[in-house]
């Protein structure tokens, strides 16, 4: 157990802080939350590695660096109403900030439960986020997700305004694509 606690501290110092994550709330949460609790038994040794770790079939936790950078860009606040889609570790981090989090990891992930979210965060990549995700945001709400069709994806932040939705790329990332969110390639006539 002491080895995992040391690995958790080392993860923050060597993977998170060195990646320009300066939000101390994220540092503190990642130091306190046992990441091994989110991976299957027998894979605890992978919890603090610099890689995405599968926690269920077709679902993986983002690399520590990637989840920290994504959350820093999303800026979760205590008053936020948050939806965590296939994002158990990110949800735990956001909860330490004091936000109200709905965890959504079962069923049709393309159709979120409810609406009016200030923040939606997704662990795992999608080829393209479903329109229902941005539709579920409140005005001023943010969607933090990695878009990936090829070998390298882009972490993106969407922000909903009165007159539409804006998008900006934040950083490169290579998480596995969530099952059911793969790119659909075909022929065009």
Image (tube, rainbow, N blue to C red):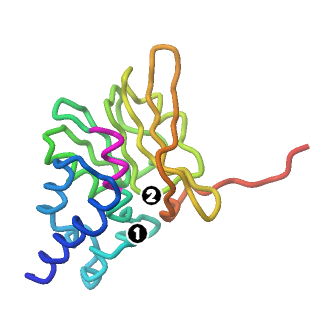
Image quarter for residue 72?
A: top left
Q: Which residue is mark 2?
A: 124
Farthest-out residue, left:
2
Residues 144 and 84: in front is 144
In the picture, measured across the screen, residue 151 lies left or right of residue 77, that is right
- The residue at 40%/72% (across/down) is 51
Q: Counting other residues with Cα less than 10 Å from the Cα at mark 1, is it few (<14), some (14-19), or many (20 or more)?
A: many
Q: Is most of the magenta stretch helix, strand or loop?
A: helix
Q: Which residue is mark 1?
A: 52
- Chain part drawn in magenta: 67-75
How far apart are the two marked residues, 2 and 1, measured between alpha carbons? Answer: 9 Å
Dot 2 and dot 1 residues touching (CB under 8 Å):
yes
Q: Which x, y percent locates residue 69?
A: 35, 51
Residue 29's place in the image compared with 134, above or below, is below
Q: Which x, y percent locates residue 133?
A: 46, 36
Tell whether position 72 is magenta.
Answer: yes
Image quarter for residue 117?
A: top left
- The residue at 11%/61% (across/down) is 32
Residue 125's place in the image compared with 7, above or below, is above
State the mark number for residue 102: none
Q: Earlier in the sequence, mark 2 or mark 1?
A: 1
């Amino acid at each position: 157990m002491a080895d995992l606690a040391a690995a958790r501290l080392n993860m923050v110092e060597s993977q998170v802080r060195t990646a320009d994550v300066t939000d101390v709330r994220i540092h503190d949460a990642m130091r306190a939350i046992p990441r091994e609790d989110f991976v299957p038994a027998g894979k605890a040794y992978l919890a603090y590695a610099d890689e995405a770790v599968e926690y269920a079939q077709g679902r993986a936790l983002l690399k520590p660096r990637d989840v920290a950078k994504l959350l820093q860009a999303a800026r979760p606040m205590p008053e936020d109403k948050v939806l965590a889609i296939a994002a158990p570790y990110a949800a735990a981090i956001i909860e330490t900030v004091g936000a109200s989090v709905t965890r959504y990891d079962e069923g049709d992930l393309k159709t979120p439960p409810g609406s009016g979210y200030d923040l939606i965060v997704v662990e795992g990549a999608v080829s393209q986020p479903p329109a229902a995700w941005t539709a579920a945001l409140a005005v001023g709400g943010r969607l933090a997700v990695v878009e990936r069709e090829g070998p390298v994806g882009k972490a993106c932040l969407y922000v909903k305004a009165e007159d539409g939705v804006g998008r900006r790329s934040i950083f490169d990332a290579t998480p596995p694509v969530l099952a059911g969110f793969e790119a659909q390639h075909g022929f065009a006539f």
